[in-house]
């Protein structure tokens, strides 16, 4: 699933790519993010162009972190504003093989730390702009890692397997709307809660933090009976349940 969520943004192929900002471009590859205005990633995998006019031209695990920074490919490169890395691995070439390996390892760790320490949020590709635009703003301010937008099937129902795969140790929130404002599809929020409960149960073995569940049920109010907790709506769909409850919000 690809998502072009900024004004004039483009994603032209690959999978799980996101162009978040105005004029951002991702030209293929997988798990790439063009996160700032006029940033671009031209392929490869797990690359991030995280500042205005930054460019990553392929490779993998590269981070163009400053304005007008450029990475020509390779792996584990990280550059700041106005600087360029060539297509080799690591920011600077090292004559000594051991030093080069240490350099590449440090760059990889720096990039992972850049996003992995920030809260991660999972939502769907069909959420209302009240959710998607807010997440876009949070990411632009550097408050969260790039959100994961989970695809829906041909009936507009969220892919639960993809949602389960999107959960990370740093996932702080999962937000799935209850009913879609355009086609009226009711999402299996209770199943989402069960997935998150299982994720939390496994996580509590090593980490006391929990992932919360949020649902935008504004379109459901007044149309179906909503019961927060272990109840069901009049459609027979759970709204929440278990040790994590679905929190209702209005747009």
Image (cartoon, rainbow, N blue to C red):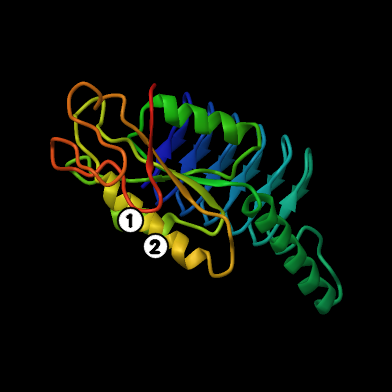
Q: Position of residue 177 (x, y in %)?
A: 32, 35
Considering only vertical position in the picture, is 26 above or below 23? Answer: below
Residue contact at pointers 1 and 2, CB within 8 angstroms: yes
Q: Quick check: 83 left or right of 207?
A: right
Crowding around mark 2 (Cα neighbors within 10 Å: few <14, some 14 to 19, many 20+) is few
Considering only vertical position in the picture, is 2 above or below 105? Answer: above
Q: Which mark is residue 194?
A: 1
Q: Position of residue 59 (x, y in %)?
A: 59, 58
Residue 104 placement: quadrant: bottom right
Residue at 14% over, 42% down: 236
**As rendered, which of 57 and 78 lies closer to the eye?**
78
Residue at 77% over, 64% down: 106
**As rendered, which of 64 and 195 lies closer to the eye?**
195
| Quarter of the image that includes the C terminus | top left
Q: Is residue 159 visible?
A: no
The local secondary structure at tag 2 comes to helix
The local secondary structure at tag 1 comes to helix
Q: Position of residue 19 (x, y in %)?
A: 49, 37
Q: Which mark is residue 227?
A: none
Q: Position of residue 7 (x, y in %)?
A: 47, 24
Q: Which mark is residue 198?
A: 2
Residue 88 placement: quadrant: bottom right
**As rendered, which of 131 and 3 lies closer to the eye?**
131
Mark 1 to mark 2 CA distance (whole Å): 6 Å
Crowding around mark 1 (Cα neighbors within 10 Å: few <14, some 14 to 19, many 20+) is some
**As rendered, which of 58 and 217 lies closer to the eye?**
217
């Amino acid at each position: 699933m690809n998502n072009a969520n900024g004004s004039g943004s483009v994603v032209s192929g690959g999978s799980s790519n996101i162009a978040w900002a105005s004029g951002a471009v991702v030209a293929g590859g997988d798990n790439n993010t063009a996160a700032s205005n006029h940033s671009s990633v031209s392929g490869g995998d797990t690359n991030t162009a995280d500042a205005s006019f930054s460019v990553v031209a392929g490779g993998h695990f590269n981070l163009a972190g400053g304005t007008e920074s450029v990475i020509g490919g390779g792996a584990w490169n990280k550059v700041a504003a106005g600087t360029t890395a060539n297509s080799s691995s690591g920011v600077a070439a090292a004559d000594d093989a051991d030093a080069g390996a240490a350099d590449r390892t440090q760059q990889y760790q720096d990039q992972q730390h850049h996003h992995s320490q920030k809260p991660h949020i999972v939502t769907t590709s069909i959420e209302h702009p009240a959710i998607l635009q807010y997440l876009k703003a949070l990411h632009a301010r550097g408050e969260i890692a790039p959100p994961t937008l989970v695809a829906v099937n041909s009936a507009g129902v969220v892919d639960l397997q993809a949602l389960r795969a999107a959960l990370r140790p740093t996932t702080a929130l999962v937000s799935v709307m209850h009913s879609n404002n355009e086609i009226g599809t009711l999402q299996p929020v209770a199943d989402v809660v069960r997935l998150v409960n299982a994720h939390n149960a496994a996580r509590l073995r090593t980490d006391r933090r929990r992932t919360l569940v949020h649902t935008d049920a504004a379109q459901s109010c007044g149309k179906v009976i909503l019961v927060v907790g272990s109840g069901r709506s009049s459609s027979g769909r759970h709204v929440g349940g278990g040790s994590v409850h679905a929190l209702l919000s209005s747009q």
